[in-house]
Image: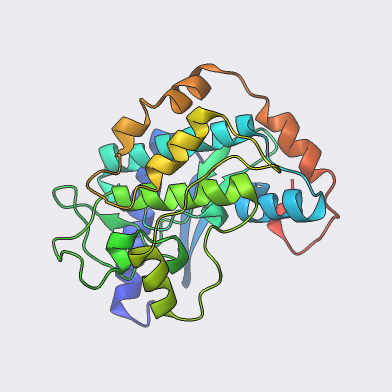
């Protein structure tokens, strides 16, 4: 039973595409409807949101670039799969929607506001987490023709900047007007080296390409998959599992958060 018609529509859209995505990737997903509707999926160890905050704030450490490389590779491949095979755009890319487990698996989650692409274009502008939205999605004067997967590329750039530096690239917004002024009118964030942290030129270039303000010049997934940074980590072995386990083993146990459950 759904109290609102759109609830049923969202649920069936989510189940249909989740099942297709999981089936193609040999992942576990079950749907049960007994009064209420439940989607049962495998339990991951942590979200990147919780993980990076513990690394930077509690441990006063950084996430190694090689780990960021594998996170980037997995996320871009997942987004490209959604677009090419299922014709959908995620629309809510952020650290809390990228998960990791102790085996080193990195997976994308939360398809609740994913949108169907029609001729590679989506039109609903208010779906998603506003701090990670691309300029073309929050600019009221933007073309009403819609937007494409490059809006998720911007969100990925914001996410990678946050994971690489331990902080969100914009100061706190007190209003939608503040966001409009900074994101739409201001210069885009740009990752760079500092006294605290040094990055490879390939990683800096990749992140800053994602944060290209003009969406017509921002790369799509096929271009990103050919980027030297992605190609490097496509070939390189990185022991993500050992790193993730080392960090999780330092986190105090808590019975109420999935982050601490194996």
Quarter of the image for residue 194 reads top right
Task: Mark yes or no: residue 41 visible.
Answer: no
Judge whether 145 appears above or below 233 on screen.
below
Q: Nearer the viewer, residue 238 or 60?
A: 60
Q: Where is residue 210 in the image (x, y as percent from the top left)?
A: 39, 44
Q: Is residue 121 left or right of residue 139?
A: left
Quarter of the image for residue 244 reads top right
Q: Is residue 233 left or right of residue 144?
A: right
Q: Position of residue 248 (x, y in %)?
A: 78, 45
Q: Position of residue 195 (x, y in %)?
A: 69, 42
Q: Where is residue 25 in the image (x, y as percent from the top left)?
A: 44, 34
Tell me what residue is drawn at x 42 percent, y 72 percent: 179
Tell me what residue is drawn at x 37 percent, y 29 percent: 225
Location of the C terminus by quadrant is top right
Location of the N terminus by quadrant is bottom left
Q: Which of 203 and 89 is in front in this view?
A: 203
């Amino acid at each position: 039973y759904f109290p609102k018609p759109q609830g049923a529509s969202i649920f069936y859209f989510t189940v249909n595409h989740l099942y297709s995505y999981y089936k193609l990737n040999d992942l576990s997903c079950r749907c049960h409807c007994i009064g209420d509707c439940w989607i049962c999926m495998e339990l991951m160890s942590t979200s990147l949101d919780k993980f990076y905050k513990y690394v930077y704030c509690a441990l006063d450490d950084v996430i190694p670039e090689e780990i960021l490389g594998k996170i980037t590779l997995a996320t871009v491949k997942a987004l490209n799969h959604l677009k090419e095979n299922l014709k959908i755009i995620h629309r809510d890319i952020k650290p809390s929607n990228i998960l990791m487990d102790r085996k080193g698996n990195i997976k994308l989650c939360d398809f609740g506001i994913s949108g169907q692409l029609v001729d590679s274009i989506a039109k609903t502008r208010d779906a998603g987490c506003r701090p990670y939205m691309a300029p073309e999605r929050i600019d009221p004067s933007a073309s009403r023709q819609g937007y494409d997967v490059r809006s998720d590329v911007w969100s990925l750039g914001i996410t990678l900047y946050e994971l690489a530096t331990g902080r969100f690239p914009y100061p706190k917004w007190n209003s939608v007007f503040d966001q409009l002024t900074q994101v739409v009118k201001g210069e885009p964030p740009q990752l760079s080296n500092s006294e605290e942290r040094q990055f490879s030129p390939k990683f800096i270039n990749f992140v800053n390409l994602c944060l290209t303000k003009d969406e017509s010049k921002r790369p799509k997934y096929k271009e990103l998959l050919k980027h030297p940074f992605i190609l490097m980590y496509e070939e390189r072995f990185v022991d993500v599992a050992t790193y993730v386990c080392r960090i999780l083993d330092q986190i105090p146990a808590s019975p109420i958060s999935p982050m601490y459950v194996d």
